[in-house]
Image (cartoon, rainbow, N blue to C red):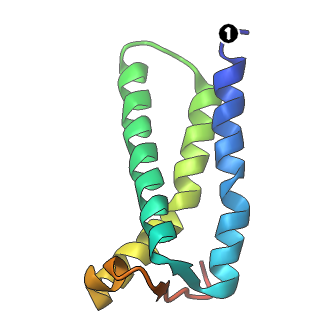
């Protein structure tokens, strides 16, 4: 019972990515600030996944909570690929001027 609040927060955070992901796939554009925010969310999620792996090695078993974080990071995975591809193709300067950034979204994403 003591993990219910944490579990609810993690699954709510993962579910909140669904409308944002749909918007990204539909418009194929994001503001530079939103792009940076998504990237930082993905970075934080990746660090949490490492935390869960360390806890697993120490014998902690919170599989339902871990699953929520893994789903959240998985939903952000497509965005991180697009973000890094856009930086590679256009350079970081394209993201720092504050304008909308066109992300090349393939139909298989």
Rendering coords of residue 54 (x, y %) = 35, 25
Q: Image height check: is 13 above or below 6? A: below
Q: Look at the image and tell me in which quarter the C terminus lies.
A: bottom right
Task: Identify the residue under disc 1.
Answer: 2
Position of 103 with respect to 87 (left or right) is right
Q: Quadrant of residue 42?
A: bottom left
Position of 20 with respect to 52 (left or right) is right
Rendering coords of residue 33 (x, y %) = 46, 69
Q: Image height check: is 32 above or below 91? A: above
Rendering coords of residue 5 (x, y %) = 70, 21
Number of marks in the image? 1
Q: Look at the image and tell me in which quarter the N terminus lies.
A: top right
Position of 66 with respect to 17 (left or right) is left
Instruction: Kindly identify the residue that appears in the image at 66 percent across and 66 percent down.
Output: 20
The residue most toward the front is 98
Q: Image height check: is 46 above or below 57? A: below
Q: Quadrant of residue 96?
A: bottom left
The one nearer the camera, 4 or 54, is 4
- Binning the other alpha carbons within 10 Å of mark 1 as few (below 14), some (14 to 19) or many (20 upward) gives few
Instruction: Kindly identify the residue that appears in the image at 42 percent across and 72 percent down.
Output: 81
Question: In what element is the residue under mark 1?
Answer: loop
Instruction: Kindly identify the residue that appears in the image at 47 percent across and 60 percent down.
Output: 37
Q: Image height check: is 90 above or below 58? A: below
Instruction: Kindly identify the residue that appears in the image at 63 percent across and 38 percent down.
Output: 68
The one nearer the camera, 58 or 34, is 34
Q: Quadrant of residue 39?
A: bottom left
């Amino acid at each position: 019972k003591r993990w219910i609040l944490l579990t609810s927060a993690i699954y709510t955070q993962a579910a909140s990515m669904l409308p944002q992901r749909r918007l990204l796939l539909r418009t194929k554009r994001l503001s530079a600030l939103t792009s940076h925010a998504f990237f930082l969310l993905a970075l934080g999620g990746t660090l949490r996944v490492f935390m869960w792996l360390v806890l697993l090695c120490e014998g902690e078993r919170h599989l339902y909570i871990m699953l929520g974080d893994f789903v959240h990071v998985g939903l952000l995975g497509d965005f991180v690929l697009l973000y890094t591809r856009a930086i590679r193709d256009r350079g970081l300067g394209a993201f720092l001027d504050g304008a909308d950034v066109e992300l090349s979204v393939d139909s298989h994403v």
